[in-house]
Structures are given as C-alpha cells and as structure tokens.
C-alpha cells in the first residue's frame, strides 16, 4: 500500500477550463490534444498539479457541471483514449491530475436522474430532492416552496405526468 502524502500542501496548481484553453483542431473549442500540447509549458511555469474543470459528457447547460456521464468525455474535448493519454502525459512530467467533479450536480440527462424520476422505488431517488407540489387556494398545483434557483426562475421543476417536483439550485437541466 502506498504511503499517504500531503503533496497538496505545497502544490502549485494550474487550473484549466477546457472549453477555452487550447484548440488543436481549429473548431473554436479547446480540447484534450490541445491541453497535451501545452503540458511542457505548464510544467515550466512551476505547476505541480493541474485542476481540470469538467471534461465529462454534458449537455452544457451549466458550463459542463451538469454532468450526464461521469465515465465519459464530452465529444468536443476528445475521447476517453485522449483523456488516458492526457493523464499519462501529466504523470510522465510529474504533474498530479485533479478533476473537478460535483457529485450532487448531475444533468437531467444522467442515468441516475432519469431512473429516479421514472421509478418511485428507485435507489437513485434518494440522490435527488423530490417533493410533492402543493395546491393553492384555487386548486392549482404549485411547487413545494417559493425558492428560486441561483440562475433565473424557480428552484423546482415539475416532473411531467406527476404532481412531484425536483429541486434544482442551478439550471433545470
């Protein structure tokens, strides 16, 4: 078993927002091959770790934080093979790799979410906050609370065909 280290206490971390970092194929979107092409530059700056903003497959309603699949790379950035090469090239240069992942912030396209809203008995239902709506004095179905999202609009989205809402603190997606 490898010994635990506190490498992060002295780390010099270089953060990369992949969408705008380095475009290797001139399509207007940063990509993994473009990042790989800059690893020597990053190392020469004195970085000891790279923190990657989301590279995961996503519908991009929340800058990639609305993750549809934690085990897949967004096609605009490249492939999983490209990512494996990126990690290997970072490690070859002695650079640690840190992935930005917000596990309580999936897309409505994620398999967990789809199953959670489709089946009340799904074990994934506990991954999300789902509540029944309330009727107003005129009998109209209303969200459980009057909360608003950090983006615009209400923090609750009606699940079609039900009287239930799911909580989203950012985009409904």
Image: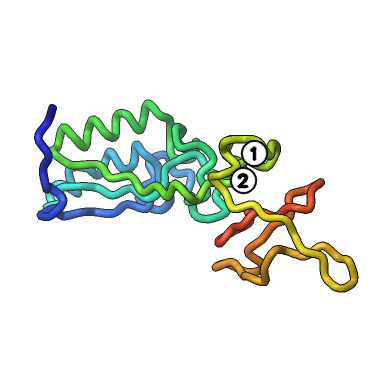
Q: At which x and y percent is residue 100?
A: 36, 49
Q: At which x and y percent is residue 108?
A: 61, 46
| Drawn side of residue 113 relative to residue 48, left or right | right
Residue nearer the viewer, 71 or 161? 161
Tag 1: Cα neighbours inside 10 Å, few (<14), some, or many (≥20)? Answer: some
Earlier residue among tags 2 and 1: 2
Label 2: which secondary element = loop
Q: Residue at x 43, y 39 (%)?
A: 77
Q: Residue at x 64, y 38 (%)?
A: 114
Tag shown at residue 61: none
Residue, far right? 138
Residue at numbered disc 1: 114
Q: Residue at x 44, y 46 (%)?
A: 103
Q: Is residue 45 visible?
A: no
Label 1: which secondary element = helix
**Quick one: quadrant of the N terminus?**
top left
Q: Residue at x 53, y 46 (%)?
A: 106
Q: Marks 2 and 1, Cα distance to the nearest angstrom? A: 7 Å
The total number of labels drawn is 2
| Drawn side of residue 103 relative to residue 48, left or right | right
Q: Is residue 123 visible?
A: yes
In this rendering, the answer to whether 86 lies above or below 98 is above
| Drawn side of residue 149 relative to residue 71, left or right | right
In this rendering, the answer to whether 151 lies above or below 5 is below
Q: Are marks 2 and 1 in contact (CB under 8 Å)?
A: yes
Q: At which x and y percent is residue 84?
A: 32, 29
Residue nearer the viewer, 154 or 59? 154
In this rendering, the answer to whether 149 lies above or below 77 is below
Residue nearer the viewer, 113 or 75? 113
Tag 2: Cα neighbours inside 10 Å, few (<14), some, or many (≥20)? Answer: some
Residue at numbered disc 2: 108
């Amino acid at each position: 078993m490898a010994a635990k280290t506190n490498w992060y206490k002295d780390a010099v971390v270089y953060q990369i927002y992949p969408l705008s970092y380095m475009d290797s194929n001139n399509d207007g979107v940063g990509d993994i091959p473009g990042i790989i092409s800059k690893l020597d530059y990053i190392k020469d700056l004195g970085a000891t770790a790279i923190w990657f903003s989301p590279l995961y497959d996503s519908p991009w309603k929340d800058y990639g934080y609305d993750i549809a699949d934690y085990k897949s790379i967004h096609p605009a950035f490249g492939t999983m093979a490209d990512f494996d090469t990126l990690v290997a090239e970072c490690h070859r240069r002695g650079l640690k790799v840190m992935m930005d992942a917000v596990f309580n912030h999936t897309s409505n396209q994620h398999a967990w979410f789809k199953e959670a809203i489709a089946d009340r008995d799904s074990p994934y239902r506990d991954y999300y906050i789902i509540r029944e709506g309330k009727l107003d004095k005129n009998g109209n179905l209303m969200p459980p609370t009057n909360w608003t999202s950090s983006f615009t609009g209400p923090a609750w989205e009606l699940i079609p065909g039900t009287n239930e809402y799911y909580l989203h603190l950012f985009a409904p997606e």
